[in-house]
Image (cartoon, rainbow, N blue to C red):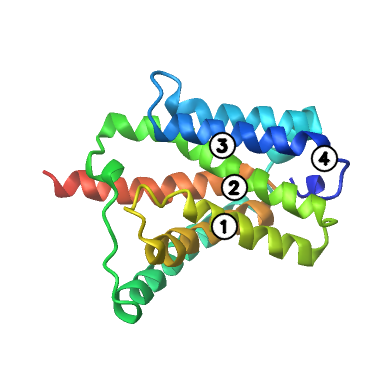
Amino acid sequence: MKKLFTVPMSKSAVPLSLILLLAGFLALSFGLPIIAPFSLAIAGFISLYILFGKKGISYTFSKPQKIVSSYFAGLIGAYIFAGVGIIITKILLGSSPNSNSVADGMTIFGLLKTIPMLLGEELITIILLIIIANLLGGTRKAIIVAVIISTLIFGFLHLPTYDWNFAQVIFIIAAARIPFTLASLRSDSLYTGLLVHITYDWIIFILVILSHH
């Protein structure tokens, strides 16, 4: 995946890529019949292809390296970051986190529907990261900047879900996002970050489902 930070990218395709990702996100957000759960993932695959050709997809989904350690470090890190974020949000900022309507209405069957949706979330975040890092030259500093910007955008995309609670999406949602991204970067594959993301969300969803019984 990290090869995409420095390989030639079709800069002229960047605006179209961003439009596609936005369209996919809107289709998901407004629940477009049938296609909604898959819209963002589809937009992500198309974006990678128009930006880099076939290697955009093959590099992004390359065989993970150090997958076990990256997975567990990412999962534990996500809960730690989110936990610290909750403390900051509630105690220091005095803001009560809002509930997630998707989680509140989750069912066991609904868990399966989240897989393509979470894949789409991973793709939009990583593609934004790749675009920024590539445009800035693929240096270590460029990657750090790209991680920060893509993480904040990921958080802001969740504003409608959490009733526009900026403190919550920055200090909890975006904070938990960082270990997902770092897991993908460390293993050099989006597969690892996706697996961490699915596990993280599913544990929360399952706890919510059990609490309703």
Q: Which residue in the rendered view is the most extreme toward the bottom?
A: 92
Distance, label 4 to label 2, CA atoms, is 18 Å
Mark 1 / mark 3, whichever is N-terminal: 3
Q: Residue tagged by mark 3?
A: 22
Distance, label 1 to label 2, CA atoms, is 7 Å
The percent position of residue 154, horizontal first and vertical second, equals 52, 52
The residue tagged with tag 1: helix, strand or loop? helix
Q: Nearer the viewer, mark 4 or mark 2?
A: 4
Q: Are marks 1 and 2 in contact (CB under 8 Å)?
A: yes
Amino acid at the residue labelled 2: Thr
Dot 1: few (<14), some (14–19), or many (≥20) neighbours within 10 Å? many
Dot 2: few (<14), some (14–19), or many (≥20) neighbours within 10 Å? many
Q: Residue at x 47, y 58 (%)?
A: 75
Q: Residue tagged by mark 4?
A: 11
Q: Residue tagged by mark 2?
A: 125
Q: Nearer the viewer, mark 2 or mark 3?
A: 3
The residue closer to the viewer here, 162 or 88, is: 162
Mark 4 / mark 2, whichever is N-terminal: 4
Left or right, residue 103 beside residue 77: left
Q: Residue at x 51, y 57 (%)?
A: 177
